[in-house]
Amino acid sequence: MNIHEYQAKQLLRQFDVPLLDGKPVFTAEDAGVVAYHHFEARGISAIVVKAQIHAGGRGKGIIYDPETNQPRMLFGKQLRGVVVIRPDEYGNVAHKAYLAARQMLGGRLVTHQTGPEGKIVRRLFIEEGAAIKKEFYCSILLDRSRSQNVIMVSSEGGVEIERVAEEQPEKIIQVHVDPTIGCQQFLLRRLAFGLGLEGAAFRSFLTFVERLYRAYEELDCSLLEINPLVLTNDDRFVALDAKVNFDDNALFRHPEYLDLVDTDEEDPLEREAAKYNLSYIKLDGNVGCMVNGAGLAMATMDLIQLAGGKPANFLDVGGGANVERIANGFRIMMSDPNVRAVLINIFGGIVRCDRVANGIMQALEQVKVTVPVIVRLEGTNAKEALEILRASGLNFLLAESFEDAARQVTAALSRSAA
Ligand code: GDP
Ligand code: MN
């Protein structure tokens, strides 16, 4: 589960992680009011207006007008997802914040993480500006290969960490945290020495990461990323950005997180699938796939790709694969207008294939499926299952093997293209 930057910062504040003062707003009028009363009237003359979307790269991202598809402009320049505001000839802070917010809200922000369709900006975060001496990177995440959390820092902040990892891997310093002893001072010091910090900056860094680690554990995060983590001119570390992913398996411990969900950021089909407890992820291809088991689902997606198609979704109907789950799976797949063919790939282990076959038939009585459906059933009672499907008179394409399924998908796609 993802949340917005301003929500992440609200949570981090509870752990005394050093942050700048800020407030979320939803309208341009409020942006002006907050900029005036909360900042300008209190002597803070540099503020930052930040678009709140569930994607990074906002600083470099461009905001388009959703109607005209032209970039929106502000003070003679292309409007970005992060706008630093200082008083100048265009006006005072509050007035400029109002104008910036008016242009940003309702705009379509395209960053390297949103894809070309971008995301509509509906919320803004107004934050005190920082006097930045240097930008660093800091993140905590679970390293599954070591079964330990890893803390990563880098002197190359404010840029994509993937790029640093590729071009200057030596600039990323990491320590693993043994869960039996926790996050000890010597680990934090190793990071601070690695970054070449000294004096007040050194001490500030230790405090920052120590608190951040506590927040990571207690909030049950799977990722907590601060990019950039900035060192201010007076040698204090503060989080300028904050990205939080929660560990979905721990959500039951945090019913309060439900309030943080922004349904505008969710894919409507994924939301629908979640209601039925189906694990569904929408992708941008043309072959719908329905599979039992996540591993087989991944293999099936590879298979579709090899056959020249592109998976339209990941869908794991789970071990049960009963009529209701199959019917809901079909319904969701069929709501995706890109789907040109469906591949059902079920391995009957505990669930018997003949029961799955009956399930598919009953589901197809409830849901209208207009594209070719290729079925591969393998495992317990696979033969009986094929008999049932053959005898049904419904228009299935029965695949005998993985390769055969791939061939049939290719054929179905080229027929639908013709
Ligand atoms: P992202 O691009 O979505 O990751 O958004 P960030 O919150 O990381 O902001 C992008 C960039 O805006 C940062 O790397 C900073 O360089 C800049 N920025 C953000 N806040 C401030 C600020 O208070 N003062 C200044 N000068 N720059 C800022
Ligand atoms: Mn960032």
Image: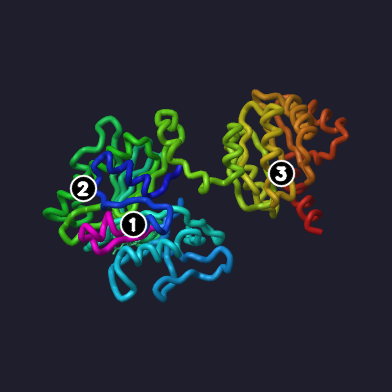
Give the residues in magenta: 32-50
Q: Quadrant of residue 257?
A: top left
Residue sitting farthest toward the left: 199
Q: Contact, CB < 8 Å: mark 3 with mark 2?
A: no
Q: Quadrant of residue 327?
A: top right
Residue 171: where, in percent of width, then height? 30, 58
Query: How far is mark 3 from mark 2, CA to CA?
Result: 53 Å
Q: Say whether disc 3 or disc 2 marks the residue closer to the N-terminus.
A: 2
Q: Residue at x 22, y 63 (%)?
A: 133
Q: Quadrant of residue 252?
A: top left
Amino acid type at mark 2: Arg
Q: Residue at x 40, y 58 (%)?
A: 29
Left of 349 or right of it: where is 89? left
Query: How far is mark 3 from mark 1, CA to CA?
Result: 46 Å
Q: Say whether disc 2 or disc 1 marks the residue closer to the N-terminus.
A: 1
Which residue position is annotated with label 3?
334
Amino acid type at mark 3: Met
Viewer-nearest of discs 3 and 2: 3
Mark number, residue 190: 2
Residue sitting nearer the eye, 155 or 98: 98
Q: Contact, CB < 8 Å: mark 2 with mark 1?
A: no
Q: Is 80 covered by the magenta stretch?
A: no
Q: Residue at x 28, y 45 (%)?
A: 175
Which residue position is annotated with label 1?
33
Residue sitting nearer the eye, 145 or 359: 359
Helix, strand, or loop for circle 2? helix
Q: Is 38 covered by the magenta stretch?
A: yes
